[in-house]
């Protein structure tokens, strides 16, 4: 642990703050966090936080979710310009127009979206909860926003539902081509391919396992001497390579990296304690609407 990390750990205690980090964050950030997880685990952890402040090491929608679920806390996003290109593909007006077009449909909104979009949706989901959430709804017709790849994967699992897809995606996961996945399999024929459902359907079709980042980690951890190609952001590959020295862990491709997730530095985390970051604030209507959608998701888990 370096001096800056030690300083952050001391400040965290002194100022009564909880530090949360997504699996895609740099390892040096994960090392100062109280909890590391995927979007769903972090949202739940933020909801139950007893500390006065929450520092969310991730991208903006994650810090917004922490604020929505625990509005009495001060929530900081250390890298204030860390956004999510997928979240930016949709605005509330798009959802409202679709609702008009499909009045019978329930709007299921992937958590990788802005608070404003969550506020006009019926329920949120994460990649680990999407299937359970969609299954739990009485509506046959589902408007799934914004990730068309996750939506298509869920539609395949639940043929009784009519899933209408929005044309958004994660450019990082959607950027993996079939050829790249096939090349990784050819290079490591003994390895199992573990893939995130934000990838394209032709990549998902090649996988031995499809699931959230938490699910991918759990699958590899169950077989600590196994061989795995990791079909999600390389933060997960780094965690497994460090944690399972007897296993063979391969990145699907070397540049499987989300630049926004990698923006957080230790200096940014320190800045939250030193008053150099602005706490997350949201309009009351967004807080109230988005909280309903997030709480419905948590309730069906
Ligand atoms: S990996 Fe994709 S979905 Fe996740 S923050 Fe980056 S761009 Fe958004």
Image (cartoon, rainbow, N blue to C red):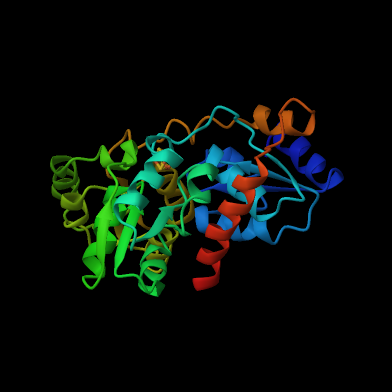
- Judge left or right: residue 295 versus residue 227: right
- Judge left or right: residue 250 versus residue 96: left
Q: Position of residue 92 (x, y in %)?
A: 45, 41
Q: Position of residue 166 (x, y in %)?
A: 29, 46
Q: Is residue 105 visible?
A: yes
Q: Residue at x 78, y 44 (%)?
A: 12
> What is the quadrant of the N terminus in the image?
top right
Question: Is residue 82 positioned above or below 21 on the image?
Answer: above
In terms of image quadrants, where is residue 179? Answer: top left
- Judge left or right: residue 5 versus residue 255: right
Picture quadrant of ligand 1: top left
Question: Is residue 14 positioned above or below 42 on the image?
Answer: above
Q: Residue at x 66, y 47 (%)?
A: 67
Q: Residue at x 19, y 58 (%)?
A: 190
Q: Position of residue 177 (x, y in %)?
A: 18, 40
How many marks do you count on the picture? Answer: 0
Of residues 130 and 22, the one drawn nearer to the viewer in this rendering: 130
Of residues 51 and 195, the one drawn nearer to the viewer in this rendering: 51
Of residues 160 and 41, the one drawn nearer to the viewer in this rendering: 160
Question: Is residue 137 positioned above or below 267 on the image?
Answer: below
Q: Is residue 20 visible?
A: no
Q: Position of residue 265 (x, y in %)?
A: 60, 30
């Amino acid at each position: 642990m370096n001096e800056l990390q030690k300083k952050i750990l001391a400040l965290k205690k002194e100022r009564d703050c909880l530090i949360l980090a997504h699996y895609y964050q740099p390892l040096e950030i994960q090392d100062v966090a109280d909890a590391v997880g995927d979007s769903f685990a972090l949202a739940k952890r933020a909801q139950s936080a007893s500390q006065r402040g929450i520092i969310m090491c991730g991208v903006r929608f994650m810090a917004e979710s922490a604020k929505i679920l625990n509005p009495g806390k001060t929530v900081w996003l250390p890298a204030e310009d860390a956004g999510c290109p997928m979240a930016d593909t949709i605005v509330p007006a798009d959802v409202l127009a679709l609702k008009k077009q499909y009045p019978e449909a329930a709007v299921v909104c992937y958590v990788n979206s802005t608070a404003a979009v969550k506020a006009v949706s019926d329920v949120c989901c994460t990649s680990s909860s999407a299937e359970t959430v969609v299954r739990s709804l009485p509506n046959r017709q589902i408007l799934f926003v914004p990730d068309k790849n996750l939506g298509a994967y869920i539609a395949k699992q639940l043929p009784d539902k009519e899933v209408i897809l929005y044309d958004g995606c994660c450019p990082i996961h959607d950027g993996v081509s079939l050829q790249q996945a096939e090349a990784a399999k050819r290079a490591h024929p003994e390895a199992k391919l573990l893939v995130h459902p934000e990838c394209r359907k032709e990549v998902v079709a090649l996988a031995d396992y499809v699931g959230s980042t938490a699910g991918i980690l759990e699958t590899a951890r169950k077989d600590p001497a196994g061989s795995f190609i990791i079909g999600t952001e390389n933060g997960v590959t780094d965690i497994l390579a460090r944690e399972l020295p007897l296993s063979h862990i391969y990145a699907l491709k070397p540049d499987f990296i989300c630049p926004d997730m990698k923006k957080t530095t230790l200096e940014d985390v320190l800045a939250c304690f030193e008053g150099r970051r602005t706490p997350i604030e949201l309009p009351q209507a967004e807080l109230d609407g988005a909280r309903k959608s997030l709480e419905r998701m948590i309730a069906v888990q």
